[in-house]
Image: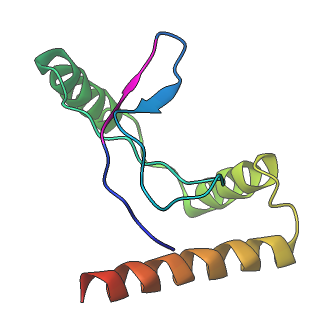
Amino acid sequence: MKAVKATGKINTVGQLSLDYPIKGTLPSSVRVIIVWEETETEVNEFWQQISEYQQHPLRSAEQLQQELKQSLTEAGYDSREKIIDLVQDIKREISQERQQKQ
């Protein structure tokens, strides 16, 4: 996996366009991480959400397990094999990120 840092804009319908083409690339699917500056309002909303979250009672391990299973199933990970593949993909990505940092 390769990583390229670029800038761009998101239009009114949520589509991303880069400010300039990335040389040496071919048409392909990509993963995108979008980073933008937070406004003071967004920061305040974040802390408000944290404060509200702290008021909720803790969930039991059984509740967490059930919610995780439901979320995985809804995301298409409905078998042991698919979940194992997901975990292996995540491990590969973590390994690649560590190698890139070295």
Location of residue 15 with respect to 95 vertically, above or below: above
Would you say residue 36 sits in the magenta stretch?
no
Asked whether, in this view, residue 39 is left or right of residue 101, the answer is left
Q: Is residue 73 left or right of residue 32?
A: right
Which residue occupies the foreground of this view, 55 or 28?
A: 28
Quarter of the rendering occupied by the C terminus: bottom left
Q: Residue at x 66, y 56 (%)?
A: 68
Q: Which residues are magenta?
A: 7-11
- Answer with left or right where residue 69 lies relative to residue 37: right
Identify the residue at image location x=63%, y=76%.
89
Residue 45: name its quadrant: top left
Q: Residue at x 42, y 43 (%)?
A: 21
Q: Quadrant of residue 37?
A: top left
For residue 47, which quarter of the picture? top left
Where is residue 96? Give x, y as percent: 44, 83
Going by the image, does 72 lie left or right of 33? right
**In the picture shown, does residue 27 fall above or below 17?**
below
Q: Is residue 62 above or below residue 2?
A: above
Q: Main secondary structure of the magenta part?
A: strand
Q: Decide which of 91, 31 is in the foreground and name it.
A: 31
Residue extending furthest left?
40
| The stretch drawn in magenta includes residue 10 | yes
- The way the protein has been coloured in the rendering is rainbow
Instruction: Name the residue located 67 percent from the left edge and 50 percent from the top edge.
Output: 67
Instruction: Name, please, the residue furthest toward the top.
Output: 12
Q: How far across and how far down the image is residue 5, in percent?
A: 31, 54
Closer to the camera in the image, 80 or 58: 80
Q: Position of residue 74 (x, y in %)?
A: 79, 46
